Image: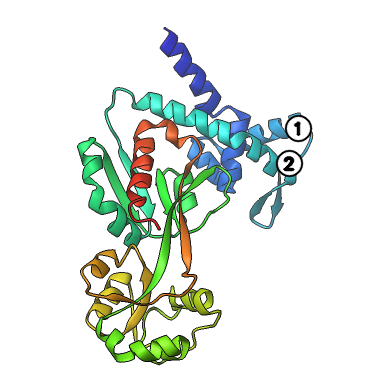
């Protein structure tokens, strides 16, 4: 009897679509009454009526129309900030209650393919041994939206993102290293010691597209100079870049975790070490209240533990 009453209480607080606060939060997050109505399985007039009830209680408008856009007012932003986390936490409890007795579900993980493949995937046996199931989605676009829409349960970010309804925690630091085939140390070792900046500019460079990912940051942080040399090879991913350097094509800058095994096997070497090598922090993000699910919490702890083995 107690469980029934408690479950019903959670349902009324969180999942009951007649709640003006819950409806408001859906409209606020979707940016549209039509989309919120679809999500709530309500009609648009019903959604409008609930917003009207809330606005009458507050004696202030929550949204204004600018063309086709529904723009939140200042009071709407304040209200969403106050209610989002408790409602999300209650919703997570409700979802967890629904899962009881239904066995494990699949945990959806998102983030960069290189990082997840090189750092996390080799250790997935630990999750397998624990009986967990995971589905990985590679890519960096719209991660916060995917967390909100529950397309993802947890995601890896390359920067801290301040978003309502999303929690974040730093869990990894990568360092960028300038690597080359050992032959280059013999060819330019003396010149590199005397005049590193000029020598490096003369070498054939392997780059990731025209943005010169990692290379620009390495020169700005390590030398206080911009990189203005034309690259010899432009390749579409970090794996192809590393293989080109192993084959002696030239030099490049890569995250230390990514070329850890190649360095250990002496297939490549660190050709140059600046006094202050550039670093980048990674973050884990999840929807408010998601860690109420013990499976998601276990995956989070696993990712933190695994990443600590590679972090600098």
Q: Hey, which quadrant is residue 1 in on the image?
A: top left
Disc 1: CA contacts within 10 A as few (<14), some (14-19) or many (>=20): few
Disc 2: CA contacts within 10 A as few (<14), some (14-19) or many (>=20): some
Instruction: Residue 50 in the image: state x and y as whole percent.
Output: 64, 32
Q: Is residue 73 left or right of residue 12?
A: right
Any mark on residue 191, and which?
none
The residue that disc 1 covers is 58
Q: Nearer the viewer, residue 69 or 176?
A: 176
The residue that disc 2 covers is 75
Q: Residue at x 30, y 84 (%)?
A: 185
Q: Is residue 268 above or below residue 304?
A: below
Q: Is residue 259 above or below residue 297?
A: below
- Mark nearest the camera among 2 and 1 is 2
Whether tag 2 and tag 1 are in contact, CB under 8 A, the answer is yes
Q: Nearer the viewer, residue 212 or 78?
A: 212
Q: Is residue 147 left or right of residue 235?
A: right
- The quadrant of the image that shows the C terminus is bottom left
């Amino acid at each position: 009897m107690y469980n029934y009453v408690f479950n019903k209480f959670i349902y009324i607080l969180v999942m009951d679509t007649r709640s003006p606060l819950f409806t408001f939060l859906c409209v606020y997050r979707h940016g549209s009454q039509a989309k919120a109505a679809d999500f709530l399985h309500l009609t648009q007039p019903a959604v409008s009526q609930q917003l009207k009830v809330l606005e009458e209680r507050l004696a202030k408008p929550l949204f204004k129309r600018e063309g086709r856009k529904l723009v939140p007012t200042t009071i709407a932003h304040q209200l969403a900030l106050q209610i989002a986390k408790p409602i999300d936490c209650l919703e997570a409890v409700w979802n967890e209650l629904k899962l009881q007795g239904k066995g494990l579900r699949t945990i959806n993980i998102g983030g960069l393919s290189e990082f997840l493949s090189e750092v996390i995937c080799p250790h997935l046996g630990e999750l397998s041994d624990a009986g967990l199931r995971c589905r990985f989605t590679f890519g960096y676009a719209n991660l916060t939206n995917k967390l909100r829409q529950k397309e993802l349960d947890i995601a890896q970010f390359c920067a801290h993102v301040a978003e309502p309804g999303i929690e974040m925690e730093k869990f990894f630091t990568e360092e960028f290293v300038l690597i080359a085939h050992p032959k280059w140390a013999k060819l330019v070792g003396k010149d590199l010691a005397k005049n590193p900046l000029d020598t490096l500019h003369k070498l054939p460079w392997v780059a990731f597209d025209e943005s010169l990912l990692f290379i620009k940051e390495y020169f700005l942080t390590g030398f206080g100079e911009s990189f203005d040399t034309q690259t010899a090879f432009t390749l579409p991913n970090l794996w192809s870049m590393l293989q080109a350097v192993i084959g002696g094509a030239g030099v490049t800058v890569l995250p230390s975790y990514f070329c850890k095994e190649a360095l250990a096997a002496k297939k490549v070497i660190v050709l140059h070490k600046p006094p202050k090598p550039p670093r980048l922090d990674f973050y884990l993000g999840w929807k408010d209240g998601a860690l109420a699910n013990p499976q998601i919490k276990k995956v989070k702890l696993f990712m933190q533990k695994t990443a600590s083995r590679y972090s600098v």
